[in-house]
Amino acid sequence: MKWEIIAIGKPSLSWAREAADDYSLRLRRMISLEITALRPNPASNMGERMLEASAGSWRVALDERGKMMSSEDFAKWIKKQELAGRKRVSILIGGADGHGDAVRSEVDEIWSLSPMTLQHELAQVVFLEQLYRASSILRGEPYHRK
């Protein structure tokens, strides 16, 4: 299964960029991962651009109002999708203003990483870490401890 993270802008905070790069590097030996950073453009509808970029995939928007799950539940979700033959999952991470109603109504699922609002660069790092953790759980590696 191919994973794609579609985010508004590249991380500009050095620590977020370094953390995202670190987890991306770790993940590349486990899964197929692509990160697409859409250049912010006030003249265009960023939600539409995210939906266009994710066309044909199972779309998941990250939003504080979404469904929360544990790391173990996330690993089970991944396994279920793989067994069902899912080819591509796109994770949509909005910019400073989050996702609009149009995006929320078009995606297949909405997940929350926290009931608190997370800065979008931090959300990307947290999601990458959780994807690495879930992948480690599925591989039986010792990264995840209870």
Image (spheres, rainbow, N blue to C red):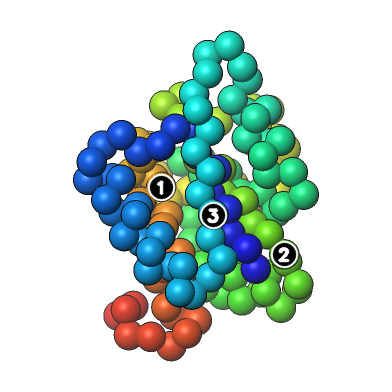
**Dot 3 or dot 2, earlier in sequence:** 3
In this view, which residue lies farthest toward the bottom?
Answer: 140
Q: In 3D space, how far apart are the residues under numbered discs 2 and 1 (Cα atoms)?
A: 21 Å
Would residue 129 appear left or right of 41 to someone viewing this image? left
In this view, which residue lies farthest toward the left?
Answer: 15
Amino acid type at image mark 2: Lys
**What label sits on residue 34 in the rendered view?**
3
The kind of secondary structure element at disc 1 is: helix
Residue at 48% from the left image edge and 75% from the top image edge: 30
What residue is disc 1 on?
Answer: 124
**Dot 1 or dot 3, earlier in sequence:** 3
Amino acid type at image mark 3: Glu
The kind of secondary structure element at disc 3 is: strand
Q: In 3D space, how far apart are the residues under numbered discs 1 and 3 (Cα atoms)?
A: 13 Å
What residue is disc 2 on?
Answer: 87
Residue 78 coordinates in the image, percent (x, y): 59, 70
Would residue 30 appear left or right of 19 to someone viewing this image? right
As drawn, 59 above or below 30: above
Q: Nearer the viewer, residue 124 or 30?
A: 30
Marks 3, 2: nearer the viewer: 3
Residue 99 coordinates in the image, percent (x, y): 55, 31
